[in-house]
Image (cartoon, rainbow, N blue to C red):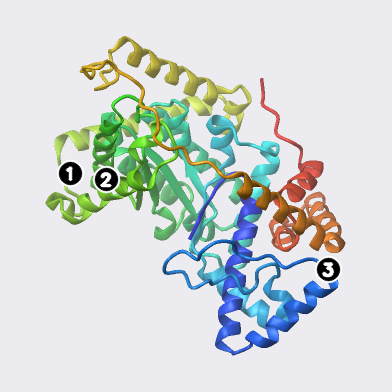
Amino acid sequence: SMTINGPAPMLLGFFLNAAIDQNCEKYIKAQGLEKEVESKIKALFKDKKITRPVYHGELPQGNDGLGLMLLGVTGDQVLPSEVYRGIRAETLKAVRGTVQADILKEDQAQNTCIFSTEFALRLMGDVQEYFIENEVRNFYSVSISGYHIAEAGANPITQLAFTLSNGFTYVEYYLSRGMDINKFGPNLSFFFSNGIDPEYAVIGRVARRIWAKAMKEKYGADPRAQMLKYHIQTSGRSLHAQDIDFNDIRTTLQALYAIYDNCNSLHTNAYDEAITTPTEESVRRAMAIQLIINKELGLAKNENPLQGAFIIEELTELVEEAVLLEFDRLTERGGVLGAMETMYQRSRIQDESLHYEMLKHTGEFPIIGVNTFLNSKGSPTVLPAEVIRATEEEKQGQIQTLERVHRQHESVAAQRLEHLKQSAVRNENMFEALMEVCKVCSLGQITQSLFEVGGQYRRNM
């Protein structure tokens, strides 16, 4: 399982091909074909006059080296095509994971856009269509994401309203392409941030209530597609560089919100993320937060410990009402895509971000160890003991690997990239073509050729 971000369709192509090749390797071992395959691979590299890639360093503990047998080649080069097709079909039905890249929140909040929004949306639709055709049922084709909206400065209501409305935009778009709601509904998942505000205590239950009602009553979806599955990550914005040990306390409380609200999965931030990439020690502490709540805390053994509490019921009603009000504002602006044209979402997020910073600055919103109850030594920013960076050797290794990939596939790359561009122009499924391109091309080559047909992203100013 893997969570995929950034240039998602390409990375997804690489990932799915890797999963298929791993199953090819298992098949080769089960059938005792290692020697035969090894000689085929040698022959492939003999003609190329290129050294075969090797894995550097020690294998991690508990790793049996699965995936290394076919390094530098793909399963279809060494197995009969009907065998390969069978393995591919079975793998796609079983593979699990999530594509997190959701173009609407990218444009509204996170800014890691590369293609024009329309083209990126079409690519997302192609991925979902491919998933339906190949019965990829356990992989989320998009994680409709509020986390990045909250990190960019939105308050909990705005995070929830923008995220759900983005979700309904995907539903409308996929329906407009003739996809069946009961086939794509279960491939959608959600991702929210849990900050410290009271509204976060009910973010999941409100999301589920609104989603299920709309899916059932507006779109006639079946019970499986009505279920909203969501991941929570504790709030990165609530981690501070002063008194950083206190961040673990904030994360613990946010994790409690998430577990009491029945999230499907949870990520607890490391306390030192305010200043550096997490260290081995801080990650262990972050994991311990979840383990202690789940294994030691008695109340968490109850599936829904807050059910029936007046404040939870009241908050649920209030938050739902506030989200529906925000839906009205979006509708008045022509829906999500219409609102994006005037940068409505971006402006709202920026205003709320500024408001939060102001409350922090004036001390109206007390943050312990940052703007109140300061350490006797004042409020110094802690400097990290270690900052993890790639070595020059690792960097050069990557560059050499890339050059080798370009040399190895010189003869076929251009033709496959042309086929990919044609599929875009002819309105065919681009992801289908991408799956083949990913076997022989680098991310840069693929992106470059798609820029030519799909346009580069330009911010609406």
Going by the image, does 380 lie left or right of 14?
A: left
Q: In this orientation, which residue lies closer to the viewer: 267 or 240? A: 240
**Which residue is denoted by mark 3 in the rendering?**
49
Give amino acid for label 3. Answer: Lys
Label 2, secondary structure: give it.
loop
Which residue occupies the extreme top position in the image? Answer: 362
Give amino acid for label 1. Answer: Leu
Give amino acid for label 2. Answer: Asp
Neighbour tally class for label 2: few under 14, some 14-19, many 20 plus, Cα within 10 Å: many
Label 3, secondary structure: give it.
loop
Sequence-first tag of 2 and 3: 3
What separation in Å lies between label 2 and label 1 (alpha carbons)? 8 Å
Task: Tell me where residue 160 appears, x and y as whole percent.
Answer: 41, 35
Can you see residue 79? no
> Quadrant of residue 367 in the image?
top left
**Which residue is denoted by mark 2 in the rendering?**
261
What separation in Å lies between label 2 and label 3 (alpha carbons)? 58 Å
